[in-house]
Amino acid sequence: MSKREKIVEVTAVFLTVGLLAGVAVAVPAYQRHNVAREAAGAQVVELYASAERGIWTEEPLLGWNSFFRHVQKRPIRIKAHRPTLLRLTSIDVHHSFSIPELRVRPSDVTPGRWTEVRLDPQEPGTYTIICYTVCGLKHTAMDAELQAY
Amino acid sequence: MSSAPIRDLKPMPSVACTPGPAAVPRRFEVDLFQLMPKVAWIAKQRWFQFAVVLPNLVLFAMFLAAGIFGTPVGNRNIIIVFVWILWWFLLISLLVPFASRVWCTVCPFPFFGEWIQRRALVRTRSFDPRTEKNAPGFAIGKNRYFGKNLKWPKALTNIWIQNIGFLTLCTFSALFLTRPIVSVVVLGSLFLIATVLHVIYRQRTFCSYVCPVSGFLSLFSMASTLEVRPRDTGVCATCKEKACLAGSDKGWGCPWLLYPSKLERNNYCGLCMECVKTCTHDNMTVKLRPFCSDTVLKGYDEAWKAFIMLALAGAYSLLYQGPWGLFKDWANIAEKGNWRGFGIYATALWSLSLLLIPAIYFLAVQTGRALAHRNESTAPLFKDVFLAFVYPLVPLGLLAWVTFSLPLVLVNGSYILMVASDPFGWGWNLFGTANIPWTPLVPQWAPYLQVPLLLTGLYFALKTGRAHAHRLFGDRISALKAFAPTATLLTGFVVFFLWLYVG
């Protein structure tokens, strides 16, 4: 193998490993940067809505989880007196997100898209999240507790 | 280490080496490399294939990541939109008809397998068999390979595995066309199988005999307007080195285990350009040629592939573009969970592909033979006539698939722009197109494009079928009688598609 061939081969190996590793690092890094920029200092909570399960959850319903993950209803906890960015998405059908007690008007939550809702709860307490779109057989269960502490 | 001397190198069976009858005489061909010397220069560089596969590999890795970590909503995930809408449309409508199996040139599936096999990404491993008897690796011709390098079992040197694999995948299409994670499982499994088979078996065994995509590429590439062929077969006849087969210090012996100097069909040539690099006489080139230039099917495996592709084009058109919701519910097992309905759908699909259409075809061919030759002893062999008359399903099937795929991309094309900006469905907006509304692109034009496409398919089907009939039955009247039932059947298929699309 000539010196030139050796250089080309080593470059090819580095390119392959580098590009694959680069994608693996760059994609989540860009996502973190993107969310942080949107949040502008606010605490961020991501909620996934699933009509099939009748639930709003912080557990990422991605990949196999979107099929098989059994998710328990848990209160969503945020810090009071701190601006909050709620990022909402649906994994199946259209929903409508609202927290009447915090005067958060119904916002469409579209499958595969992210809806952003900003709040700034001044009082610690428990608030109810409600879905205002009849989203399926478990629509009536599509509520969740938002605990500001 | 064991080695295989050059004189022992034989191409695998079932490849396009045995001369077949030329049903349609070639009218024109253009030596693309002579016309565009810069393209020839690029194709001859050792880094060429690496340079085109690597970006594709990175994209593929990103698609898999999007399927695993991205949104489970199909139309917002790049793996669904780019693979099953964009890639499929480009593959079937542009790459295959105009560039043969050029997809195989850039396919990422064999990347790691071939890397392990060659222990090289760009360079070759050549050696002089007279002086380097103990060089590491397994010697084939003048190249050295690593891994087991077993020969694929002779009984499986056909495309039956590809036929069954493709049909199986297509049976569950409603599942992986809509669920990113299932697409990951399908594509990831193929990637793993390709890698493992490369380690165990020789060269591109996976691509030749196992890859389900390769199966239909092989069939439809016969119609393509591009080919890799020798410039002058006389030069090959006198060539002593046979570097295209045995390899050399410039390149690997044909990874597809073909004998490039005797290539007569596109079916099993992956356009990797190794023969172009290795040829000591600069005799291998890429040529432009008329549509439907390869017209000979060589076995029932290829014939059944044609039946499967036609049946699937019809079934998918009914399923995805017809107004019958019941069929959709049957096929959509993931969401409906109707196993009885899915059973009916799967049974109908498999029966149609493997039994019903072949049986109707058998009847048409036999009727034609009986009409043309009352005396059984002078009639051409059934197999010859059957394979010759199945060939028209190649242009017809290809155009039927293009016809089916066209409205899919017209209606869903705007998703391509959306996911290009937000490939994972995480809320990105890279190019400012993430939030454009779903906008079907002139769907009202679809029928005006579909009708000419189908009629073009029928024209080529009848043209090539008639040429085969002339070759087999000699006189014009006998040929007409022999081909008439098959021609009627082919026309019937087109009428069915026309009814479905514009009826």
Image (spheres, rainbow, N blue to C red):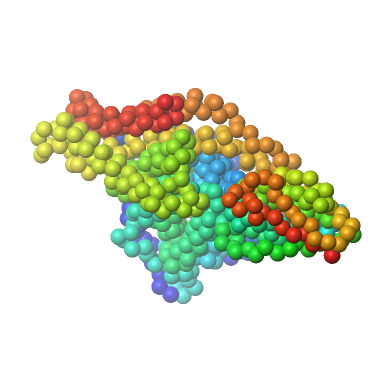
Dividing the picture into quadrants, the one containing residue B10 is bottom left
Q: Nearer the viewer, residue B255 or B243?
A: B255
Which residue: 42% across, 42% down? Answer: B327
B188 w.r.t. B285: above or below: below
Answer with left or right where residue B222 lies relative to residue B361: right
Q: Position of residue B325 (x, y in %)?
A: 46, 39
Dividing the picture into quadrants, the one containing residue B229 is top left
Which residue: 80% across, 60% down? Answer: A126
Answer with left or right where residue B217 lies relative to residue B361: right
The mark tally for this picture is 0
Q: Position of residue B324 (x, y in %)?
A: 44, 37
B97 w.r.t. B502: above or below: below
Which residue: 63% across, 47% down? Answer: A135
Which residue: 24% across, 31% down? Answer: B485
Q: Is residue B6 visible?
A: yes
Q: Position of residue B153 (x, y in %)?
A: 33, 63
Q: Nearer the viewer, residue B349 or B18?
A: B349
Q: Position of residue B61 (x, y in %)?
A: 61, 57
Q: Nearer the viewer, residue A129 or B183?
A: A129
Q: Is residue A23 visible?
A: no
Q: Quadrant of the N terminus of chain A?
A: bottom right
Q: Quadrant of the C terminus of chain A?
A: bottom right
Dividing the picture into quadrants, the one containing residue B22 is top left
Answer with left or right where residue B154 lies relative to residue B371: right
